[in-house]
Each structure stands twice: as structure tokens, then as C-alpha cells.
Image (cartoon, coloured by chain):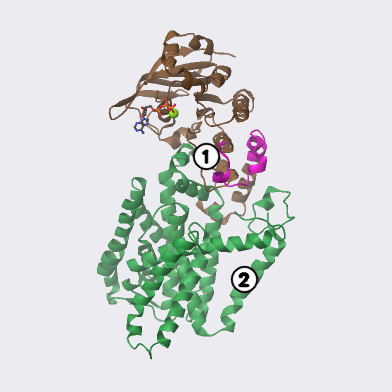
Amino acid sequence: MAYLPCGVYHERYRQEHAWWQTRFVRAKMGLLAALLLVFPLTTNPYLVSVANIVGYTILSALGVQLLIGVCGQITLGHAAFIAVGGYATAIGMLQYGLPYPVSLLVGAVLAGLWSVLFGLPSARVKGFYLIMTTMAAQFVTVDFIITQYVSRIGGRGHYFSLPPGTVTIGPWVIDSDLKAYYLMIALVVGSIAALANLLRTRVGRAWVAIRDNDIAAQTMGVNIVRYKLLAFFVAGVLGGIAGAFWISSLYFVSPEHFTLGWSLWLVGVVLIGGIGSLQGVVFGSLFVTLTLEALGFAVSGLRDLFPTLPDKFLYVKEGAFGLAIVFFLLYEPRGLAYRWQQMKNYFNLWPFAY
Amino acid sequence: MDTSGEILLEAVDLHMAFGGVHALRGVSLRIRQGEIFSLIGPNGAGKTVCLNCISGLYRPRSGRIVYAGEDITRLRPHQRAARGIARTFQRIELFGGMTVLDNIRLGRHLHMRSGLLAAAIYAGPSAREEVAHREFIEREIIDLLEITPIRHKIVEMLPYGLQKRVELARALALNPRLILLDEPMAGLNLEEVEDMARFIVDINEEPRWRVNCLLAEHDMGVVMDLSHRVAVLNFGEKIAEGTPAEVQATPEVIQAYLGEAEGLYASRR
Ligand SMILES: Nc1ncnc2c1ncn2[C@@H]1O[C@H](COP(=O)(O)OP(=O)(O)OP(=O)(O)O)[C@@H](O)[C@H]1O
Ligand SMILES: [Mg+2]
């Protein structure tokens, strides 16, 4: 729970329902927005590409957070829906000549519907069995349908490449990391805002109620099957948007991008950032991506000492990630977002700590 | 009090078994419009099972449940809620991680309209709806149940007595016609019992609410004071029914409770 700074009270419910309730917070958010907009203009291209990976991770993990953290439905197959979004967008542009924004929408809706299909068992099963069906989504979608059938469409070989200049929004051609960065910011901000709005209204409360106590939720009039499927739909749509962004920043798409490993990775991001929190998704994605890049530098720096290390980097990376998750589960089970909230509350209540 | 009124809820010949345990053996109940109706009986008599059948969490093996003239035996719990049946639980079933206000807001679920798109955009209809329901909750429920100071608190941090009150608040938010209260007094201290009894009478009598109550309760004192009519269950069978005075004078009831006489008065856990 967040506290307001000492001495701030509201006179109307409207104000209390607002996201940013004091002028100070609004100023802070304005500053953050300005920072995000000028950031890529002031740094080197490498950092911009890292920022794009962070953004892609955020977009990917939002759906996982919604299912696991908000609605309590475990999913280990989210990469499948990202793949559906990526492939549908690519096919929409390459095969049918649709503009990018239209393909993105089609891809997002298809990913949402595909996700509902694999969410259907959640009406009957929980926990372990749901893990199995969501993993089935992973294998059926990526390893079977996409690899065996979808990849053959148009005879393009195993992966679809999008020639530079394919991804355009109106007259705006997205052909550099810098441009992809601005697309990423728009998608991330839009997705987080939409999800945050859902969470503070009827739909989001029903999701949290299902997570906290599904029996009570039913008796209060929540159609839990319907709302679980709605959560799968929205999570799928968010995954689809992530996939559509991915192809705009990489110019090609291949089944190898959407492995079970990536699905598990996203669950880890959510655990590290903080279960149930949208801020947590941002913190988790930043932490994981930046740590990984730092590790990459460390590994190449140590190449002289241990010549075989770069070959083993994959294992180092996964090992470090596993360790980080274990560390967080043991010492910070509520994730980075909780720590951040604690810090903020401390300053807000200052100088009266209680 | 008009006791010859129209029948709101009728349970006909409910049977329910768990393995070898016959929890209900042909229980029939009739709750009339405007009543506080109590179900009493020793531990394990089948009171909770009976409420679960009425709210739809259990499906009776046989028997029918008719509510406001409609057979609701096959409806799912959320469909029964939509027809105006709300409930509280013997062991509190709140949404622990939410604030008191959000718990009560969830109770307004059926009265809100915002769909996916409107809610995602928020500005406009969805925001107006949130504010309107907030006003309703503050004015009608939070004031009535005297929980103003705790409305922003996380529910699982609250003491037991207040949690019971929040559960009642959440059920009221549904704007129900019938409320099923499963041992609302259990675990409360004397003062809290008095408050709770007052709230139950308030929601039953205030023209604004006029909620019918089906109360499953151990506390004989409370039951006899509040109820218009009482039914007594023992081992899944109804052994008596009538006004509190009639029931207290029934030999079977005295017998059923005799072995438990101490338990009866010390039953506030
Ligand atoms: N889900 C269940 N599975 C198995 N047996 C059950 C279940 N629910 C209730 N029972 C059994 O049914 C019988 C009636 O239980 P019930 O909970 O209705 O009693 P009660 O009258 O509410 O008692 P108490 O005053 O202790 O709450 C008991 O013997 C109980 O063990
Ligand atoms: Mg009981």
C-alpha cells in the first residue's frame, strides 16, 4: 500500500482515484517522460539496442504478470503467443501486403484468441495441470505448427526476413534501432497504461478476486470461467504486441526466438520484479537485461584468462539467472517493486516515520 | 411483523452425502419475505452444507431450491448472486490482499457495466462509474457498518472481528434480497456480538435495505432475540421449526441439545 506524503488529503473521490495524486508526482512523471524521449539521442547505438531488448522483455512479461501475478493462473508457454503475434504480423505484411499497424492488430487479436484456446482447461484444472496445458501451448504452437507448417508459407525458408522498409507506420519507416525505440516506448507506455486501468476497475478486481479466493469471487457474482478466459485473452493480446514489436526491431522472425527457455525466462522476470505488480515487470526486465549485458562484458573481458569461457557463456547466463531467482525467492520474495515502494513510503512519510 | 407473507426461498427435500456421511437427509425450508430465519443445531448438524446448497457451492444429491418463484437448483453460484443471493462464510473468505474498499467494490461487480475496452481507456464512462459506486459504498455501506477509519486498510491485517464486518459489507454491496450468514457471531467478543446483531436488525428493517436473512448460528441468545422463525437441524434432519418460543419448548430440541448443554453456552469460539 502506498502512503501519500504527510499533510496531503483529498476532498473528492475523483482525486483519490487518480494515478498521480500530487503535483510533485506529476512533475516526476513528466521528467521521466522527457528523459525517455531524449535518452536515445544522447547515447550510443549500443545502449539504444539494449533499451529495445528491455522494452521487448517488458511487453513479453506483462501478459505473464497478468496471468500469474494478477489472476493466479500459472503459465509456462507464453512465448507461444508472442510467436503467434510475430508470425501473424510478418505474414500479414509479406503475404497480404497489410500495413504494419493493421498487421499488428490482427496479430494481437489472433494471439489473444489462440491464448484463450489454451486457457480453456483453466475452467476445470488448477496448478500443476494448468502448467502442463500451457507448456503444451509452447510445443504445439512453436515446435509443431509454426516450425512444420507456418514456416513453409510463401517458400521463404526456415525464417521470414523482412527487408528494410517493410515496417512502416504511414510515412514513418522504421528502419533503425532509434526508430524502433520510439515505437517501443509508445507500445510499452500504451500497454502498461491500459493494463493499469483494467486493474483499477471492475475487470481487474475480478481477476485479483479469482487469485485471492475463487470461491468467494463466485458467490459475489464473478463468472470465474469467463474472467479467467478474459485474462488469457488479454495476456495473449499483450504477447502478440510483443511479437509484432520484435519483428520491427529485428527484421526477421524464426521459431528459435520463441523457445520454452524464453517462456521460463519471463516467469523469472516476473518473480524478480515482484509478483502482481506492473512496476515489477519494468524493474524485473531492466534488472535481468542489464545484468545479462554486464555479464556479457565480464565474459569477454575474461577471455584472455579463460579462453573457453565465451563458448560457455550460455550456461553462465542461465546459471546466473537461476541464482538470481533463488536469491530473490529467499531474500526478497516480493521482488524489486516492493523494495522500491518501501523506499518511496519512507520518503513520503518523512519526517514522521509512523 | 407479517409472517403470512409471500415465500422468497423454498428448499424442498434436500439430500446431500459426502461418502458415507449423510449431511442432509430431506431438509425442507421456507423463508418468507421480510424474515430473519435461523438455522440452529449442534456441530456437524448440516447448517453450513445447507447454506452451501442454497448459494450453489454444493449441488444437492436430490431436492429442489426455488427462489422468488424460479427453480435455481441447477444455477451456478454467480448466477444465484445475480438474482440477489449474497452470503458470508463461517471461516472468513475475504480477498486478503485487497483493501477493505476494494473488497466492497468487488461486491458491486454485478452492478457495474464497464467492459474491457472502456476499462482499459478509463477516462470517461469507466471513471464516472467508479466514482458513482464509490459514493454509493461510502454513503450506504461504510457509514452503516461503521468502518470509515479502516476503509483503506489491507483486509488480512485487520483483527478478526472487523474482518467479519467487512464480509458483511461486501455481501451488502451486492444489494441482495437474501443474505446467508454463516455463524456471523462466531469468535466475536460481547461488544462485537451486539454490534453485529444491531447491523443484522438494521439491514432487515431499514426500508432502504429490507434484506431477508438466513442465519446459521450457535449463539442461542442471539438467535432467540433476532429471529422471526427458527429451524433446528440434527444429524442432517430438521427436528423442529417455529417461532423461537415454540422451538425452545420442543422436547426433541431440548434432547438434541442436552448432551451439549455446556457446549451450547460456551460455543463462542
Ligand atoms: N466438503 C465436505 N466433505 C466431506 N464432508 C463434509 C463436507 N462438508 C461437510 N461435511 C460433513 O457434513 C456434516 C455437516 O457439516 P456442516 O459443516 O454442515 O455442519 P454445521 O452444522 O455447519 O456444523 P458447525 O456448527 O460445526 O459449523 C459434517 O459431518 C461434516 O463433516
Ligand atoms: Mg458450519
For disc 1, the marked residue is: B110
In the depicted structure, whether residue B142 falls above or below residue B223: below
In the depicted structure, whether residue A207 falls above or below residue A297: above
For disc 2, the marked residue is: A33
Q: Position of residue B218 (x, y in %)?
A: 49, 23
Q: Quadrant of the N terminus of chain A?
A: bottom right
Q: Position of residue B83 (x, y in %)?
A: 49, 31
The magenta stretch is B136-160
Tell me the shade of chain B.
Answer: brown
Q: Quadrant of the C terminus of chain A?
A: bottom right
Mark 2 Cβ and ligand 1 under 8 Å apart: no
Instruction: Say if residue B82 shows up in the picture.
Output: yes
| 1 and 2 marks on the same chain | no
The chain to which mark 2 is attached is A
Amino acid on which disc 1 is placed: Leu
Q: Quadrant of ligand 1?
A: top left
Q: Who's the residue at 59% across and 24% down the image?
A: B204
Q: Position of residue A187 (x, y in %)?
A: 51, 67
Quadrant in the rendering for residue A325? bottom left
Q: Is residue A163 left or right of residue B118?
A: left
